[in-house]
Image (cartoon, helix red, strand yellow):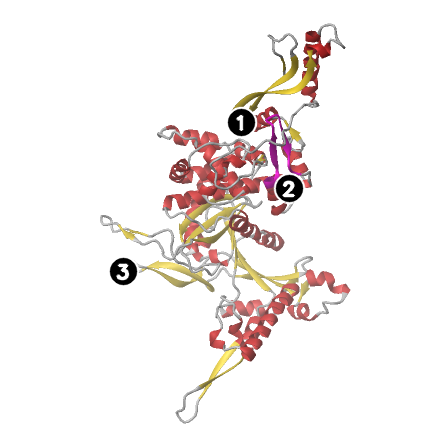
């Protein structure tokens, strides 16, 4: 702060003037009127000396964060005309300062300096990556939408849309190095729990009606499959797909990912990605955990080497008759809590409404079955035929493994409740609709409807529909049962608790698809499609690290609570002198400020103060 007055005037007015740097804009503002020379003569013999003293006192109060400003408002002042078609909000987000804290610790600026150092790139790769990542968390949309809303952030980043596309091309070229860099530098933020690695696959659809064609290299004869291909859609959408494989650690934080053609079998992408992880881990042992769809014989064999182990969900329906007989043989079942012998018959029949049986209703019972011999587990392996084609054949496992079967009365009642509702819908279909017009599927209610055809003396047969009790009885047989296969010798409770955490990887996919809107994908270029998912992956990693840091801090909040807080942490510029917060205090806001010691819990901010905070975060 300094003193300002017209030195040529015989009766000057003294002001306290402040120099303001607001982003790239530098200006000065008269923030307080001290008084006119003639006015100050009434209280001081030397008005100039008095004015200088007022400036010194004001600077002292300014350092303490308590100042009295004089700001004039002209209520007749009009908005400045622009060429924008639609009006834009002038609020600026500062919630991304929290994300910037984690982003900086990942040392991505160093990565992009090295990656772009030997190229002719003239734009700032790190700035583009930062705000594409932050936008995916705070305001997800297309790359063009992100570009058009860059002025919603306090920093007001500046780059062209063409730079975004060129950056994505460069990012994809560094695919493996980038993912490895993220993993290695995540240790700067917290210790990773990689003793167990969870794997799963999902797919993302495209708003197009055709798939990418296959390309045959005329020189090598190699068939290059297009990325966007028709495949099994978990959303039942008739669109081309891209498949993502994701490895996650024991705390739900991603380790690495793969992007493959939508028509690929998800079993195929597990081992190639796991080999990359082994290289990143430098030989560290871990347990591979996945569901039944990604637990083929090849995967189990691969994770029986190098000191690794596996825990995979095992379908009881696909077991051989010999193993199913062992499952349903009501012998040697034990309670999981205290290892006391019990029977499935008792678990199915005790009075679940009796208060004394409340703990038993929540209980699980288990049995361990040896499956290390050449026993049919319903698995398949690949065999190369003489003509070069790869064929899947049913295999018998020669692995040291066991099957842990559990039964839960609560799960049984829930599954039967769901089925009974489906049966009721099937009965209504028989009463009110034509069965042939109802959509059918493996889990559709029409599976309970049986068709019988009648005809006499060569006449045209007529169809008769009834509820198929045999199908109901067959399904009820498996109610409440669950099984995992493993080659671990740990106690059953430990193995099952590891398997139970598989839900966290599904939660990662939910975050990507719902909160970060990773789908539908509007890119058509293969390189940029992969780069799009690399940005989404970065956003997921940063958010999961933030979530885990909050948990370690002793506070836990839902995803919506955290994201809503970050999205609503906005400020408004008042005459380039101060910024006022437009958000209220909350438990999430308090925890974030306590965790990062960033001081974003104030009502007013000086531009200089926010600039210092950002500079401190970015090192």
Question: Disc 2 or 3, which lies upstream in sequence?
Answer: 3
Say which element carries label 1.
Answer: loop
Q: Disc 1 designates what residue?
A: 23
Which residue is tagged 2?
551
Between circles 2 and 3, the one closer to the viewer is 2
Q: List the residue tagged with mark 3.
A: 387
Q: How many labels does the image show?
A: 3
The C terminus, quarter of image: top right
Q: Which residue is nearer to you in this view: 249 or 49?
A: 49
Q: Is residue 353 found left or right of 16 in the rendered image?
A: right
Residue 124: x %, y % from top left: 43, 30
Q: Is residue 567 magenta?
A: yes
Q: Is residue 335 above or below residue 61?
A: below
* The quarter of the displayed image where residue 415 is located: bottom right
User: Which residues fall within the magenta stretch?
Assistant: 565-583
Residue that lies at the very extreme toward the left in this rendered image: 219
Q: Where is residue 207 in the image (x, y as percent from the top left)?
A: 42, 54
Q: Distance between the residues labelled 2 and 3?
A: 56 Å
Nearer to us of marks 2 and 1 is: 1
């Amino acid at each position: 702060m300094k003193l300002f007055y017209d030195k040529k005037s015989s009766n000057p007015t003294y002001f306290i003037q402040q120099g303001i740097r607001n982003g790239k804009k530098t200006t000065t503002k008269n923030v307080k009127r001290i008084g006119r020379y003639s006015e100050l003569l009434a209280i001081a013999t030397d008005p100039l000396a008095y004015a200088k003293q007022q400036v010194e006192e004001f600077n002292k109060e300014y350092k303490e964060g308590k100042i009295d400003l004089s700001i004039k408002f002209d209520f007749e002042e009009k908005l400045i005309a622009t060429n924008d078609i639609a009006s834009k909000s002038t609020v600026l987000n500062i919630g991304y300062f929290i994300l910037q804290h984690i982003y900086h610790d990942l040392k991505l600026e160093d990565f992009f300096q090295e990656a772009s150092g030997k190229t002719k790139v003239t734009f700032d790769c790190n700035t583009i990556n930062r705000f594409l990542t932050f936008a995916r968390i705070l305001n997800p949309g297309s790359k063009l939408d992100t570009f058009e809303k860059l002025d919603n952030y306090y920093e007001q980043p500046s780059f062209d849309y063409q730079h975004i596309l060129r950056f994505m091309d460069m990012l994809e070229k560094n695919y493996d190095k980038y993912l490895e860099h993220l993993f290695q530098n995540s240790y700067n933020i917290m210790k990773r729990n990689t003793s167990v690695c969870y794997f799963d696959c999902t797919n993302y659809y495209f708003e197009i009606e055709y798939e990418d064609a296959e390309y045959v290299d005329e020189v090598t004869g190699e068939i290059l499959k297009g990325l966007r291909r028709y495949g099994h859609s978990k959303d039942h959408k008739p669109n081309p797909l891209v498949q993502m494989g994701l490895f996650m650690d024991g705390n739900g934080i991603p380790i690495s990912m793969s992007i493959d053609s939508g028509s690929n079998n998800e079993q195929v992408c597990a081992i190639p990605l796991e080999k990359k992880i082994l290289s990143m881990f430098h030989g560290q042992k871990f347990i591979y955990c996945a569901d039944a769809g990604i637990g083929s014989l090849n995967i189990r064999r691969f994770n029986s080497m190098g000191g690794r182990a596996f825990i995979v969900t095992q379908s009881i329906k696909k077991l051989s008759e010999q193993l199913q007989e062992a499952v349903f043989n009501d012998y040697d079942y034990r309670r999981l809590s205290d290892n006391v012998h019990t029977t499935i018959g008792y678990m199915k029949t005790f009075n679940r409404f009796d208060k004394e049986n409340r703990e038993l209703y929540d209980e699980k019972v288990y049995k361990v079955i040896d499956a290390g011999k050449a026993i049919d587990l319903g698995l398949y392996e690949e065999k190369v035929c003489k003509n070069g084609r790869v064929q899947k054949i049913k295999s018998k496992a020669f692995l040291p493994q066991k099957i842990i079967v559990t039964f839960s009365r609560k799960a049984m009642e829930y599954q039967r409740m769901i089925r009974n509702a489906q049966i009721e819908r099937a009965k209504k279909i028989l009463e009110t609709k034509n069965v042939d017009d109802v959509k059918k599927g493996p889990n559709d209610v029409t599976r309970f409807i049986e068709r019988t055809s009648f005809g006499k003396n060569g006449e045209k047969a007529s169809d008769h529909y009834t509820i198929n009790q045999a199908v109901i009885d067959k399904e009820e047989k498996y109610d409440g049962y669950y099984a995992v296969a493993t080659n671990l010798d740990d106690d059953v409770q430990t193995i099952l608790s590891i398997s139970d955490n598989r839900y966290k990887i599904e939660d990662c996919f939910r975050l990507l698809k719902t909160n970060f809107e990773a789908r539908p994908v509007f890119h058509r270029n293969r390189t940029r499609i992969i780069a799009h998912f690399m940005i989404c992956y970065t956003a997921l990693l940063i958010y999961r690290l933030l979530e885990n840091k909050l948990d370690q801090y002793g506070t836990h909040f839902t995803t919506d609570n955290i994201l809503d807080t970050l999205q609503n942490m906005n400020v408004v510029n008042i005459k380039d002198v101060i910024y006022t917060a437009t958000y209220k205090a909350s438990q999430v806001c308090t925890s974030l400020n306590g965790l990062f010691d960033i001081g974003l819990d104030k009502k007013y901010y000086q531009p200089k103060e926010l600039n210092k905070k950002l500079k401190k975060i970015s090192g």
